[in-house]
Amino acid sequence: MAHKRLLCIAPGHVDTDALLRETLSGWEIRIVTSLLDAGRELRNNHYLVGLLVHDREQQKPGEVDAFLRRHSGMQWVGVFSSRDLESTPCRDLVIEHLCDYHTAPVDPLRLSHTLGHAHGWAMLNGRRQQLVDHAHGDSPLIGQSDAIARLRAQVERVAKVAAPVLIWGESGSGKELTAQAIHAGSERAHGPFVPINCGAISPTLIQSELFGYERGAFTGATRGKAGLIESADGGTLFLDEIGDLPKDLQANLLRFLQEKTICRVGSTRQIRVDVRVVAASHVQLQQAVAGGEFREDLYYRLAVLPVTVPPLRDRRDDLVALAEHFFHIYASEKAPRLKGFSDRAVAAILDHDWPGNVRELINRVRRAMVMSDGRLIGPEDLGLTRGIPAPQQAALGDARDRSERTALRDCLDRSGQNVSRAARDLGVSRTTMYRLLVKHGMRS
C-alpha cells in the first residue's frame, strides 16, 4: 500500500503521468490540471508534498502566489522552463514558496530524490507538531514546565465546582486564557463566556453596560437592552482587572453575587441570572483592601478559589514551545519563505527576562514574522540583540557534530520522539535539548 502521497498540478498538455508513475514507486499520485481542481482536492484530502508543473499561459504568477500562500503547510517542488525562470515573478515564486525546483526537461532520478527529501522533511515537521499537540492536549495553557503544570492542575480542580474564582497574575501573563480554560473544563462549557475589562469601560457607562437598562432610563435609551451580566446567563462572566471597578459598582456587584439577581438601570424589577463569576487582577487585591480602594466583603466573595498565573520568567522550559506555537498561529502574517527561528533567535528568547510576559512574546514574534528578510527569524528581528554574540564558525569539529546528531536522533527514536524523556536519557535539561535540536536543524 502506498505510504506517500503526491499532489501534482500540471497542465493537460504535459504528459506527467508516465514520468511520475514510472519514477515514483511507492507513491500515491493525484494529478490535476488547474489550481482550482487542486484547491478542491486539498479541501477533501491531506497531502504533505505537492509538485507544481508551471505553465505561463495557464498559471498567472499572482494566482499561483495566492494558492501557495493558502497551502503553505505543504512542501512544494516546482518544474519550470528556462524561459520561465528569466521572469522576475516566476523567480519570486521559487524563492518565496518552494523547497526546491527543477528545470524542464526533468531528470527523473533527481526529481525522485527531491520529492523523497521533501516528504521526509514534511514528516519530521508534522511529527514534531504532533508531539507538541500531544504534550499540550486540549488545554489552551501551553507548556510542560513545572509552573504551568501546577496551573493546569489548579484549573482542573476549580473548574469542577461552581464557586467564584479570583485569578492573580502579572499583566500579560495569560489571566483571560486561564479563565477560558476554567470555563471550558466546567459544566458551563456549552454556555457563553463573556469577558469584561473593568478598566476599559467608561465609569459613566459601566453601570448600564454591566446591568443593562430600560427604555427611557437616560437620554438616548430608545429601547431596553440586556447588560453583559445577563448575556452570560448559563455560562461564565469574566471580570478582568476587577480592581479598577468603581467603589459604588462594587456594592452592586456584591449584591448580585449574594442574591443572584440584577436590576436594570431605570427599572425596579429583579431579574434572576445564573452565571459563574471569574475575576482577575494584576494588582494584589489584599493591598487594595488595606488601602481602602476595594471592598473587603467583595474581595472575600470573589476569592473563594484563588488561582495564580505564573510569569513567563518562571516558565523557561516553555519559551521555545510558546514561540513556535505563536509562529504557527500567526502563520498567515508571515512571508512564505520564513520557516522558523534561528539558533541565535532561540538563544535570545531563552536569555530574555520577558517583563511583558506572554503578551510581549506574542508581540515580538508577530513583529519578527513581518519584518524578517531571511528564511529564519534572527534576534534582531525580535528586538533581542543585547548579549547575543554575532554568528561565528562552529567551534566543534564535524566529527563531534555528527556524533551529537546521531546521539540525539537515536535517543529520540528510543523515546518515541518524546523530547522530555530523551533529555532525561541524555542527562540534559529540556532547554539544552531544544538548543541541541535547533543547532542540528532537527526542528521545523
Image (spheres, rainbow, N blue to C red):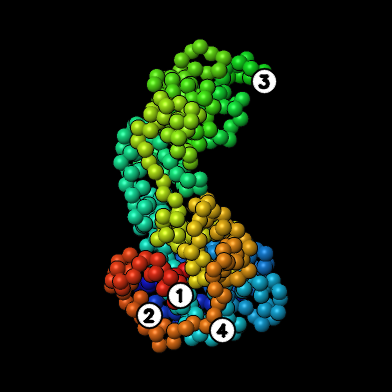
Query: Are the residues tagged 1 and 4 within 8 Å (C-beta)?
Result: no
Q: Are marks 1 and 2 in contact (CB under 8 Å)?
A: yes
- Where is 200 relative to 106, above or below? above
The residue beneath circle 2 is: 404
* Amino acid found under the numbered disc labelled 3: Gly
Q: Residues within 10 Å of mark 4 (few under 14, many from 20)?
A: some
Counting residues from the start of the chain, the first of labels 4 and 2 encountered is: 4
Q: CA distance from mark 3 to mark 4?
A: 72 Å
Task: Single out the residue that lies furthest toward the front.
Answer: 291
Look at the numbered disc 1 and give the secondary structure of its residue: helix
x and y percent of residue 322 in the render?
Answer: 46, 58
Residue that appears at 41% across and 73% down: 436
What's the residue at 54%, 70% (across, down)? 388
Instruction: Tell me, for residue 106, which label it has, or none.
Output: 4
**Three-letter code, disc 2:** Glu
The local secondary structure at tag 4 comes to loop
| Residue that carries the numbered disc 1 in the rendered image | 439
To which residue does mark 3 refer?
Answer: 220
| SS category of the residue bearing label 2 | helix
Quarter location, residue 37: bottom right
